[in-house]
Amino acid sequence: MTAVQSGKAATGRAEITRPGTVRAGAVVLVLAVLAVACLLSLSVGSKPMTVARAWEVLLSPDGTWESTAVHGHRVPRTILGVLVGASLGVAGALMQSLTRNPLADPGVLGVNAGASFAVVLSVALVGQSSIGFYLWFAFLGAALASVAVYALATVGQRTGTPVRLALAGVAISGALQSLTTTVILRDQVAFNEFRFWVAGSMEGRLYGVVWTVTPFIAVGLLVALVLAPALNAMALGEETGRALGVRVESTRRWTVVAVTLLCGAATAAVGPLVFVGLAVPFAARLMVGSDQRWVTGFSLVLGPAWLLTADVLARVLVRPSEVEVGIIAALIGAPVFVAIVRRRRIAAL
């Protein structure tokens, strides 16, 4: 038995391969969906506008209300949707590979719980509730929660195994959620702001938010792409990974850093969007196979397509008002995910 075969047997990993033509077709399809979603995101809003008109004023601003709406609100919102979708999709792919669990979510590291607690605490202590104010607190809370999870997972030993990371994440998240509940029950302003933020929304997020989170997301995506080959080798088993030259503990550490940057920035910008980081890499694996390099790259495109589609639906369902995008993303994803789980046997990665 070869080293690769023995590694697969040791981990119980179900290898899924796809022909190159199938992968290329899947990429082209998702890119087309993403392009259509971007065009609709620029044209759909509280006031109707044709796609042709939105494209016209995008290229040639003319001072009309259409031009103001597109350049002042819909362009930054679309850019943010692309960034957040890519962040959550790739973060989910990393988290599932790190824990070898196809149902793992970036929230396992306590990122959402840390950001939520930081938001309500900052609003309760200072009394301000603007996105520009608590954005940095949300990101800081996400980062500190991830550090606490990793520190707890490595207590008493040099390495943090996937199981220990998951258990530490559950423990830290539970504690932070309890603290969050305590704060919002005692502070009405914090409760009102948290009630809106926790549903997940891209409404009113302008260029300032985009420029703030872009550097963190860019670094996180770069680290994720660099880690993909090492995570591929680790999926064959830690011993096999070491034999192939992978620094296992260093790879785990950098994976946690990448997930924190990606999910922390996304959560800080729009709130905790559930299900995107869970379903996107799972669907990507079904479409392009289990090669982590392909899964990461495909999630980078599928995530924005998924989130922008949900955002467009959020704007039209109750027009002229809109539903929070987090609600629509969950409503779209849950039935799809249940159908996938019922049709396929869940195997360890």
Image (tube, grey):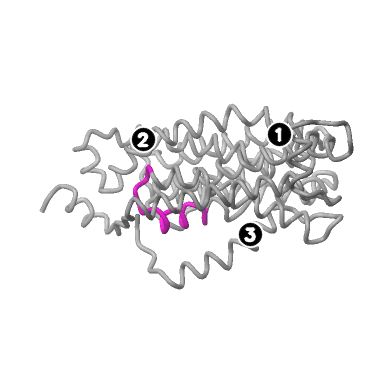
At x 85%, y 55%, the residue is: 321
Identify the magenta region.
278-293
Residue 297 x, y percent position in the rendering:
45, 42
Q: Residue furthest left?
A: 1
> Which is closer to the viewer, label 1 or label 3?
3
Q: CA distance from mark 1 to mark 2?
A: 29 Å
The numbered mark at residue 330 is 3
17 or 232, nearer to the observer: 17
Residue type highlighted by circle 3? Ala
Residue occupied by mark 1: 135
83 or 200, nearer to the observer: 83
Q: Is residue 132 left or right of residue 261?
A: right
Q: Residue furthest right?
A: 64
**Mark 1 packing: few (<14 Cα in 10 Å), some, or many (20+)?**
many
Q: Secondary structure at mark 2?
A: helix
Residue occupied by mark 2: 251
Q: Secondary structure at mark 3?
A: helix
Say if residue 183 shows up in the picture: no
The numbered mark at residue 70 is none
315 or 335, nearer to the observer: 315
Residue type highlighted by circle 1? Leu
**Mark 2 packing: few (<14 Cα in 10 Å), some, or many (20+)?**
some
- Magenta segment main secondary structure: helix
At x 21%, y 43%, the residue is: 240
Residue 232 x, y percent position in the rendering:
31, 44
